[in-house]
Amino acid sequence: DEAGIAAALAERREARAAQSAAAAGTAGAAGTAGTAAATPSTPASASTAAPLGACWRYAGNEWRRLPGDITLNACAQQLFGGRCEKTGGATYGRWGEETLRLVPGRVEVSSDNRTFRAAFDQGPNCSIPNG
């Protein structure tokens, strides 16, 4: 249910914040090196390419990471492509630090898990268009 998902998201964020703080504390002279693992990034040579991030599926009351770092569009396709959400329903996922929510006809994104904005409209057969 949505309350359980919100609680799981909050726990995950707190754990990631604690990990980042611990890594930053041990980074010493490395500066921001401790936060690099928690922040999606792209190589300097690919600065015009879409950013990459970890993609997470919520299933069975737990978060499961999909292999590799991928774009937001690729994550939405893997999580929600071909899936039609029923009226009043929602399915959740994560990409980097963003919460993804599938609702009827579109995929929404939120950085604070409270305010969502449309990221992609679903196409025919509940497909996610290439970004």
Image (cartoon, grey):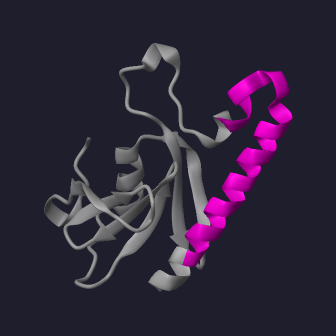
Quadrant in the picture for the C terminus: top left
Q: Main secondary structure of the magenta part?
A: helix
**28 inside magenta stretch:** yes
Instruction: Give above or below for 51 relative to 99.
Output: above
Q: Left or right of 46: which side holds 81? A: left
- Residue depicted at 73% across the width and 25% down the height: 31
Of residues 34 and 71, the one drawn nearer to the viewer in this rendering:
34
Span colored in magenta: 7-35
Q: Residue furthest top?
A: 45
**57 inside magenta stretch:** no
Instruction: Give above or below for 50 relative to 116.
Output: above
The x, y position of residue 26, in whole percent, is 85, 36
- Residue depicted at 27% across the width and 85% down the height: 88
The x, y position of residue 108, in whole percent, is 30, 61
The x, y position of residue 84, in whole percent, is 26, 73
Q: Left or right of 130: which side holds 96? A: right
**In the figure, residue 47 lies in which quadrant?**
top left
Task: Say if residue 18 shows up in the picture.
Answer: yes
Instruction: Give above or below for 108 relative to 52.
Output: below
In this rendering, the count of numbered labels is 0
Q: Left or right of 31: which side holds 120? A: left
- Residue depicted at 43% across the width and 69% down the height: 92
Of residues 112 and 63, the one drawn nearer to the viewer in this rendering:
112
